[in-house]
Image: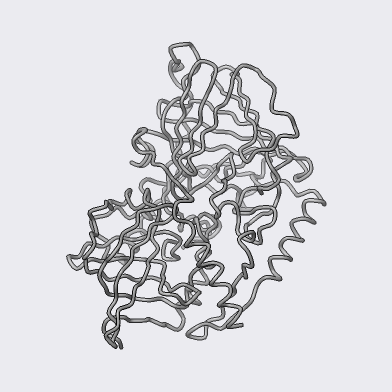
Amino acid sequence: MRTKRLLVLVAGVGSLLLLTVLPTWAHHAFSAEFDFTKPVQLEGTITKVELINPHSWFTIEVEADDGTTEIWEIEAGAPNSLFRRGFTRDSLPVGTKVTVRGYRAKSGEMRANGGNITASDGFTIFLGGSNPDNQ
Amino acid sequence: MSDRFLNLGGLAMVAVLVLIVQAPATGQTQRTPWGDPDLQGVYTYETATPMERPEQLGDKEFYTEAEIAEMKAELDEQNAARRAARATISRILDPRVPKTGVTNRTSLIIDPPNGRLPPLTPEAQQLQDERKAERASRNISRVGDGGTVTDDLVYNSWLDLSDYRRCIARVIPRHWALYNHGIQILQTPGYVVIHYESMHDARIIPLDGRPALDASIRQWNGSSRGHWEGTTLVVHMTNKTDKQTWHSWGTANAIEGNTLLPVGNMEFVERLTRIDENAIEYQVTVNDPTTWTAPWTYVMPWRGGDESGDEYKGPEDLFEYACHEGNYRFMENTLKGSRRMLELD
């Protein structure tokens, strides 16, 4: 198991999620962009917060086991939605160490749809968006 | 889980449920200083009620109070479990937890009496079938990590993506949304403005009896003309464009979407009536003889103030939703993702 970057490939998770009726209301079809057979858990440091429409993005630096630095972009919900959950621009400032759970992009790039993001002080927020965990 | 819940078609998965009260019109009609019925305020059109009624409920229009109580109890139980499962979530309001309760209406559709959409015309059915076949032809299956078989739609162009997701337009009249479901009504002498938070659309509806736009002019949000019938604002909306389809993510050429029925021939009669100081009853009759074999009508509340579920109490609770702002990543992810899926196929 990798200590810094853990790709969680769980047999059965995908089939479980397939049973979930994907809704028609999410702005972006999750399945068009992200692969729910590839859940990821990332530990890193926030380097950029983009509270933009239609979905926000967090950029984090992740140190891989080989010592290289990976730059991951994490999709979150609309700024309106995050704000209504209590998130502000000061909630996760640049430099915050975080753990993110989500699903990797189908393209194979270092992008993921975020589920929960947890800061080192315990602050956790559900990132929403089109994540199937939103069901 | 009871059959009733299963029959509600995923009600339990709805993010936020809003209690719909069958409130009769009471008291003095609120009026603007110039004497029009006053519909002004900030509202949400969020609702847990499905558009169509589960077939097995027949003509049953409302749940009984006992049935509502049973459903609420089940929801409370499920939400308690969800909260427990989401124990790491803190300092936030989990938007997936219903704030209030469930509706007692079994469907938004009130006509036909069975609460379901009328049959499609043969022409519309053929169109629907052709587009579903096109969609199916774009589907590839793959075996993912863990041996899971998944289906992927292949997107070849940005034109395969719907106008909804390309942030071009979203169908009005609206009838459901997970987020950005705020509405503000403003009135001036001679006009009513309906501002939708999603896409920050503003319909400026004249009340002076002018005719609709020429039939040759087609707009994403159509042409709206209003007048008062007693305390009800009646709005006729026409001149929609066939670039858009009802009521989905679809465009005429997109491979995605639930239904792929062009809205160009659809005419809408919207009726807005204040039913109490915090709520508007919003009723829409949809008529398009080229699509459905009969007109149909749905009704839903627009709720404001304390009954809006803490989200839409006033104008300060509406935010700009600049959909285009960062949408390039979505396009990249979708098109690159499809190329990757084809390589793996």
Residue B210, horizontal then vertical, whole percent: 66, 19
Q: Nearer the viewer, residue A19 or B209?
A: B209
In what quadrant of the picture does the C terminus of chain B appear? bottom right
Residue B79, horizontal then vertical, whole percent: 35, 58
Q: Nearer the viewer, residue B32 or B107?
A: B32
Name the residue located 48 percent from the left edge and 30 percent from the top edge.
Answer: B280
How is the protein colored in the picture? one colour
Residue B236, horizontal then vertical, whole percent: 65, 29
Name the residue located 82 percent from the left edge and 51 percent from the top edge.
Answer: B123
Residue A34, horizontal then vertical, whole percent: 48, 70
Q: Taking B154 as reference, is B101 left or right?
A: left
- Residue furthest to the front in view is A68
Say above or below: B60 vs B203. Answer: below
Q: Taking B296 as reference, is B11 left or right?
A: left
Q: Nearer the viewer, residue B281 or A81?
A: A81
Q: Taking B134 as reference, is B309 left or right?
A: left
- Residue furthest to the left in view is A121
- Residue furthest to the top in view is B34
Say above or below: A132 vs B195. Answer: below
